[in-house]
Image: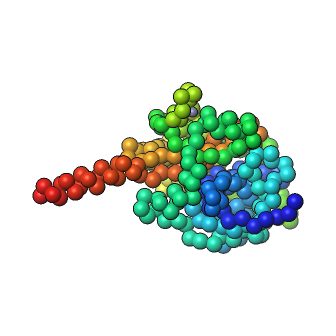
Amino acid sequence: MNYEKKKVLITAKTYPHPSATYQELVCTAGVLEDGTFIRLYPIDYRYMPYWKWYKKYQWIEVEVIKHDKDPRKESYRPKIDTIKPISSPLSTKNNWQERKKYVLANGTQTIEYLNELKNQDKTSLGIIRPEKVSDFVIEPSTEEWKGSWQDVLKQNNLFGPDKKPLEKIPYKFSYVFKCDDDRCNGHKMMMEDWEVGQLYRKMKEQGNSPEEAAQKVKDRFYNDMCASDIDTHFFVGTVLAHGTWVILGVFWPKKESANYKIKKCLIGKSEEE
Ligand SMILES: [Zn+2]
């Protein structure tokens, strides 16, 4: 098999974790121009030259090959030195129209439907549109990386780049939601978005206690992104080792009908005045 060049719209990046083989690993997911999901793995993102640091909703070009050790359908191994950002991030104008064109090109799924696909052809990425998101749970997690990962971080890497400190977030965050599917009994699913960890760290740097910082994460990822006027979608993916689904990111344009109502309201008002 040969490497092929693909154009990928980045839609999700997970918080890095240490790796014995690579510096540390980030799961990056995105869509091709026809809306097909793709996972680029592994990428030691923070160790790439800065100009290669891609953002969400940015198109990149990259040479990839189907992953030989990862049977998940969408997993491709990228040739790191071919990664090239080729656009600025797509805008959120017109209620995320430009992003929707690619992200929702093949519609949305439910976890129940994705599980069927997983059994059929090892599908491991998707986008769901929950019927209801009812909570965002903050639970304490360990302060430190697990033992084997700690060893990796401590290893003296004589020939590699210097280790950058990788802070463990002492909480885990999960969404509680129900799919728009008769078979759904509800889910409590871990949220693995890189931005959750970034926001938590930023809030702590600004002088908040760990509890306050975690609460600010909830303010953003639940109160804002799951507000009643928001059309909340989740990017989801399976974990290689266990096959369980986790949330990789949130896609959160406004509800179209709500927009329409607001406009109508305003028009009505101006007519009265
Ligand atoms: Zn469900």
| Position in image of residue 67 (x %, y %) | 81, 53
Q: In the depicted view, which residue is nearer to us: 111 or 80?
A: 111
| Position in image of residue 71 (x %, y %) | 80, 45
Does residue 23 appear to the left or right of 34 in the view shown? right
Does residue 56 appear to the left or right of 40 in the view shown? left
Does any portion of residue 166 appear in the rendered image? no
Report which quarter residue 239 is drawn in: top right
Vertical placement of 152 versus 211: above or below? Answer: below
The residue depicted at 78 percent of the width and 51 percent of the height is 19
The residue depicted at 75 percent of the width and 41 percent of the height is 121
Which quadrant is home to the C terminus? bottom left
Which quadrant is home to the N terminus? bottom right
| Position in image of residue 52 (x %, y %) | 68, 69
Does residue 252 appear to the left or right of 161 in the view shown? left
Report which quarter residue 51 is drawn in: bottom right
Q: How many marks?
A: 0
The residue depicted at 50 percent of the width and 53 percent of the height is 203
| Position in image of residue 209 (x %, y %) | 50, 46
Does any portion of residue 131 appear in the rendered image? yes
Vertical placement of 124 versus 119: above or below? Answer: below
Q: Quadrant of ligand 1?
A: top right
